[in-house]
Image (cartoon, rainbow, N blue to C red):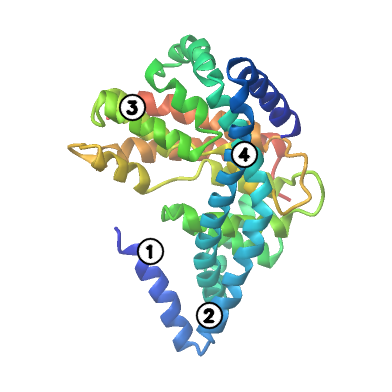
Amino acid sequence: MSYIVPLLIVAVLVTGLFRRVNVYDSFVLGARKSVGLSVTVLPYLAAIFIMVNALHESGLDVYVTKLLAPPFQLLGIPSEVVRLVLLRPFSGSGSLAILADVYKQYGPDSYVGRCASVIMGSSETVFYVASVYFAGTKVRRTGWAIPIALFCNLLGAVAACLLCKVC
Amino acid sequence: MNIVWTCVTVIALCALTVVRPQGVLTVCLDSCAQAVTTAIGLCGIYCLWLGVFEVADRCKLVEGLANCMHGLNKLLYGRVSQAAERYISLNFASNLLGVGNAATPSAIAAIGETEHTDTLSRSGAMLFVVNATSIQLLPTTVMGLRSSAGSANPADILLPNLLSTALTSVVGVLLVFCAYGRAK
């Protein structure tokens, strides 16, 4: 499985050679766009990180987790992973840290550890992705996109905890 | 986004001021520094993938991929420009292969093609939801973390992960259909 990506890159370059494309020039031309793209994204990242870090440093995230643990338990989500479910839409690195924490405390093969693994795999950093995707556009009103994505995250978490009991 | 960000940030900063006033500025500055490091990291990732995509595009490989996926794209996104359709196909392929890093630049390029007003279009919403709920065949990051945490069988989560991502994708796409109607 770890061969897929390297093979893909080599295959693209070799195809370029056979089809008489200026591979080197094309690569440089494409790669140049990355500079503008990352500069556009930067201020949006700063805004998201300020929000997430302020939430974390003030201890509000722990408070909110405690408050929301009972309703999440009704949905079948164990209280140990509620913090992961809540932080996941905001921060990828933050939720990875929580996942590592869960592994250390409960073990990666425990029910809670497996739940957390599947929750991590089947959800996305919705707010982070939204800010990066729409950074370069005029879009200010995102309509249903974010609510639908958040709902699917929650659904994924509920499904993950159920599926880990069965298989 | 405006309302959510402002409310949450104001509440969090107020709480932090009460708990630890000397920490407020440090947190804000650290966050901005973190944004710079992340953006530089992303720049490197985009560099590689945008370069490879450009080569693939010049070889007409992307065009072939877009032709293969034309039916599915039309059903999900409706009528979009040819360039957008190429980026959407690239994005889908990267997501399926679990190359999440490659999916971001192609999605940004596709969104740039489909969005011209300040309100997100149906195609843009669909692209966002497909990416936010993407079917994952191989959750590489999580499996890596599991094996380094000493898991007896890191791949043990493959099946529930596949089922759960498939479920969220289907529900997400259906919800976009409910909210925006069929593709035009």
Instruction: Residue under label 1, please give it.
Output: A5
> Could you say which disc has been placed on residue A102 in the image?
3
Instruction: Residue under label 2, please give it.
Output: B59
Q: Amino acid at mark 2?
A: Cys
- B134 lies left or right of A2: right
Q: Earlier in the sequence, mark 4 or mark 2?
A: 4
Q: Secondary structure at mark 3?
A: helix
Q: Residue furthest left?
A: B152
Q: Are marks 1 and 2 on the same chain?
A: no
Q: Amino acid at mark 3?
A: Val
- A124 lies left or right of B163: right
Q: Residue furthest bottom?
A: A20
Question: The residue marked by circle 3 belongs to what chain?
Answer: A
Q: Are marks 4 and 2 in contact (CB under 8 Å)?
A: no
Q: Are marks 1 and 2 in contact (CB under 8 Å)?
A: no
Q: Earlier in the sequence, mark 3 or mark 1?
A: 1
Q: Are marks 3 and 1 in contact (CB under 8 Å)?
A: no
